[in-house]
Amino acid sequence: MENLIIGTRNSPLALWQTHWVKHLLEERGYRVVLK
């Protein structure tokens, strides 16, 4: 399984967008780590 690390600290993405993207990727079988 692939691990994706999403950095949220300096990201212009709003927090809800980050979690929405995380949800979409997890539906596709990715393991998403928010940092």
Image (spheres, rainbow, N blue to C red):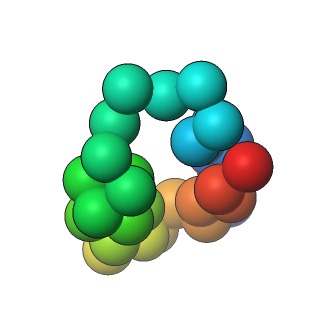
Query: In this rendering, would 2 be left or right of 18?
Result: right
Residue 15, x across and y down, in percent: 38, 56
- The residue drawn where x is 26% and y is 53% is 17
Residue 29, x across and y down, in percent: 45, 68
- The residue drawn where x is 52% and y is 60% is 30
Is residue 19 placed above or below 2 in the rendered structure? below
Is residue 34 placed above or below 27 in the rendered structure? above
Give 16 or 34, whichever is nearer the viewer.
16
Asked whether the viewer can see residue 24, the reply is no
Count of labels in the image: 0
- The residue drawn where x is 29% and y is 63% is 16
The quadrant holding residue 26 is: bottom left
- The residue drawn where x is 65% and y is 56% is 34
Query: In this rendering, would 14 be left or right of 5?
Result: left
Give 31 or 15, whichever is nearer the viewer.
15
The quadrant holding residue 10 is: top right
Is residue 6 placed above or below 15 in the rendered structure? above
Query: In this rendering, would 14 be left or right of 35?
Result: left
Q: Name the image quarter holding the N terminus.
A: bottom right
Asked whether the viewer can see residue 17, the reply is yes
Give 17 or 1, whichever is nearer the viewer.
17
Residue 11, x across and y down, in percent: 49, 28
